[in-house]
């Protein structure tokens, strides 16, 4: 994915409270994983997370399931992108409510906890969703030195695709960031097609910050974002 960016700044509604959202797309969180090429794994001995994240961001469509903890606040969100449709759908959950955002072409809608969808400008929707997309969630993990701390664990099946699993424990992470605690760890799963399939970070960005990212339905033609009913 991309050059290192500063830590994600949560939207104003998320700073004072946590939020939930309903995913308005043709594939729900429990949908079966989408189509994915069956390309033999290369068994490289080093990971390139930046390249794997960039490959995901360049996909025609994909779905992210993300859980992050920042101190005492936990957010869960689902984010679906369908580029041929110029659409995306976001669901964010936290302890204080639900936020739903849908954007299709030049149209966009929002619904907050207990409220019906209302139309808003697409630009406003994009702004509200900033930080929940691939760059916002994973920019911190694209550093080449961080990738160099990862070691190959082995070949696995993850989120419906063949992957290679890489891991860095605290000792390895300290070569990238000396201040990480002894409980820190990073696991990265890279799919056979070269894109990120999953990531699990414990105490990597900071001692009280964790993240788990699961990727589904990459380039699946069944992906579609639907307007609110």
Image (spheres, rainbow, N blue to C red):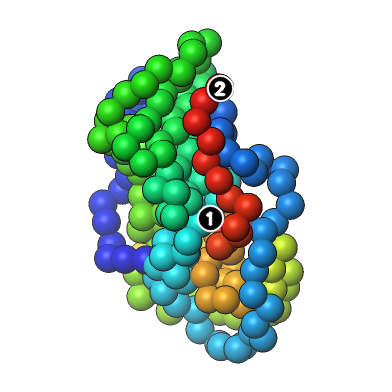
Dividing the picture into quadrants, the one containing residue 129 is top left
| Residue found 28% across the figure and 62% down from its top | 4
Q: Callout 2: helix, strand or loop? A: loop
Question: Which of the numbered marks, if any, corresponds to residue 229?
Answer: 2
| Residue found 27% across the figure and 56% down from its top | 5
**Which residue matches tag 1?**
62
Q: Residues within 10 Å of mark 2 (few under 14, many from 20)?
A: few
Q: Quadrant of the C terminus?
A: top right
Of 125 and 41, the residue lying toward us = 125
Seen in the picture, residue 125 relative to 179 is either above or below; the reply is: above
Measured from the top left, where is residue 151 in percent x and y? 56, 79
Of 175 and 124, the residue lying toward us = 124
Q: Callout 1: helix, strand or loop? A: strand
Is residue 15 visible in this depiction of the protein? Answer: yes
Q: Nearer the viewer, mark 1 or mark 2?
A: 2
Q: Residues within 10 Å of mark 1 (few under 14, many from 20)?
A: many
| Residue found 52% across the figure and 25% down from its top | 228
Seen in the picture, residue 204 relative to 115 is either above or below; the reply is: below
Measured from the top left, where is residue 55 in percent x and y? 44, 70
Q: Is residue 49 left or right of residue 179?
A: right
Q: How far apart in space, not on screen, are marks 1 and 2 (Cα)?
A: 23 Å
Q: Is residue 115 left or right of residue 129?
A: right
């Amino acid at each position: 994915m991309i050059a290192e960016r500063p830590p994600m700044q949560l939207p104003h509604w998320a700073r004072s409270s946590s939020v939930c959202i309903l995913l308005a797309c043709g594939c729900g969180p429990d949908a079966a994983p989408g189509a994915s090429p069956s390309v033999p794994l290369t068994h490289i001995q080093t990971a390139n997370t930046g390249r794997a994240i960039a490959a995901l961001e360049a996909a025609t469509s994909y779905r992210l399931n993300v859980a992050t903890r920042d101190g005492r606040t936990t957010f869960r969100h689902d984010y679906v992108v369908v580029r041929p449709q110029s659409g995306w759908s976001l669901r964010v959950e936290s302890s204080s409510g639900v936020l739903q955002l849908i954007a299709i072409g030049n149209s966009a809608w929002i619904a907050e906890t207990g409220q019906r969808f209302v139309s808003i400008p697409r630009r406003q929707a994009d702004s509200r969703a900033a930080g929940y997309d691939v760059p916002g969630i994973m920019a911190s993990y694209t550093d080449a030195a961080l990738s160099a701390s990862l070691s190959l664990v082995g070949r696995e099946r993850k989120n419906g695709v063949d992957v290679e699993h890489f891991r860095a424990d605290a000792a390895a992470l300290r070569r990238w960031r000396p201040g990480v605690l002894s409980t820190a760890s990073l696991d990265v799963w890279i799919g056979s097609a070269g894109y990120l399939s999953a990531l699990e970070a414990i105490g990597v960005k900071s001692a009280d910050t964790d993240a788990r990212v699961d990727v589904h339905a990459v380039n699946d033609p069944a992906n579609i974002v639907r307007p609110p009913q």
